[in-house]
Image (tube, rainbow, N blue to C red):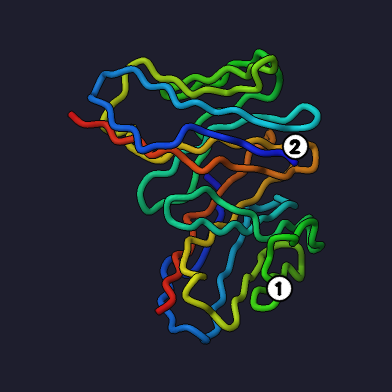
Amino acid sequence: EAEVAQSPRYKITEKSQAVAFWCDPISGHATLYWYRQILGQGPELLVQFQDESVVDDSQLPKDRFSAERLKGVDSTLKIQPAELGDSAMYLCASTGQGASGELFFGEGSRLTVL
Amino acid sequence: GDSVTQMEGPVTLSEEAFLTINCTYTATGYPSLFWYVQYPGEGLQLLLKATKADDKGSNKGFEATYRKETTSFHLEKGSVQVSDSAVYFCALSNTGNQFYFGTGTSLTVIP
């Protein structure tokens, strides 16, 4: 069964360092999302892509976060510099034609900032 | 804006007990409604969904009915098992493929 791939699964870094997460959506899914999930809370949208274009990045802290999906397939989310409050699970999800409106999630990348 | 409100947890039940997790939504138009489940250390996975009013979604013994008149999508299961212990999220999607999630309800089932 096709899956959304994410890496790394776990990342520990010190504050002020740069961090990057990678996501490869299910093949053919045009819409890709990055969510942040703080422990005990629901996922919060950071950025939504339609192909290579950003549809919604209104909740992305643009002073330190950036996201790209250059060829409309895989995507990278970067944080620079990382802050203590960025410790969270970063979830990638995708959907598209044939997905019956369902959102498919990867296993997530857990970030710990020390 | 669109939003989802779900029952806060945590919820602890004995095996074979009846489960209800309440979910209400606010949306313009006609959203699709979902329940996602997250097991420890994993990403979210779809449990069930309903795309229009009066639809009932069901999977693995769980059910939820899309009630437009009460803007609700409550999750129910008649007899929970230890393996159902997880966090459950109610969600909606609108015509722009935007998804909104509730804060999650943690369920622990004890033998």
Residue topped by disc 1: A62
Residue in the picture at 73% in, 30% down: B31
Q: Residue A42 versus residue B70: which sits nearer the camera?
A: B70
On the picture, is A44 further left or further right than A14? right
**B38 left or right of B84?**
right
Instruction: Tell me residue B100's x, y (percent).
Output: 64, 43
Image height check: is A108 above or below A62? above
Identify the subunit bearing mark 1: A
Residue nearer the viewer, B48 or B22: B22
Which SS class for mark 2? loop
- Left or right side of A34 for B94: right
Between residue A63 and residue A99, name the one nearer to us: A63
- Looking at the picture, does residue B110 appear above or below residue B20? below
Residue B64 image position (x, y, % from top left): 53, 20
Badge 1 amino acid: Lys
Q: Which residue in the rendered view is the most extreme toward the bottom?
A: A16
Q: Is residue A70 left or right of residue A8?
A: right
Q: Amino acid at mark 2?
A: Asn
Are the residues tagged 1 and 2 within 8 Å (C-beta)?
no
Q: Nearer the viewer, mark 1 or mark 2?
A: 1
Q: Residues within 10 Å of mark 2 (few under 14, many from 20)?
A: some
Q: Residue at x 69, y 55 (%)?
A: A32
Secondary structure category for the residue under label 1: loop
Which residue is tagged 2? B94
| Quadrant (top left, top right, bottom left, bottom right) of the C terminus of chain B | top left
Q: Position of residue B90 (x, y in %)?
A: 55, 35
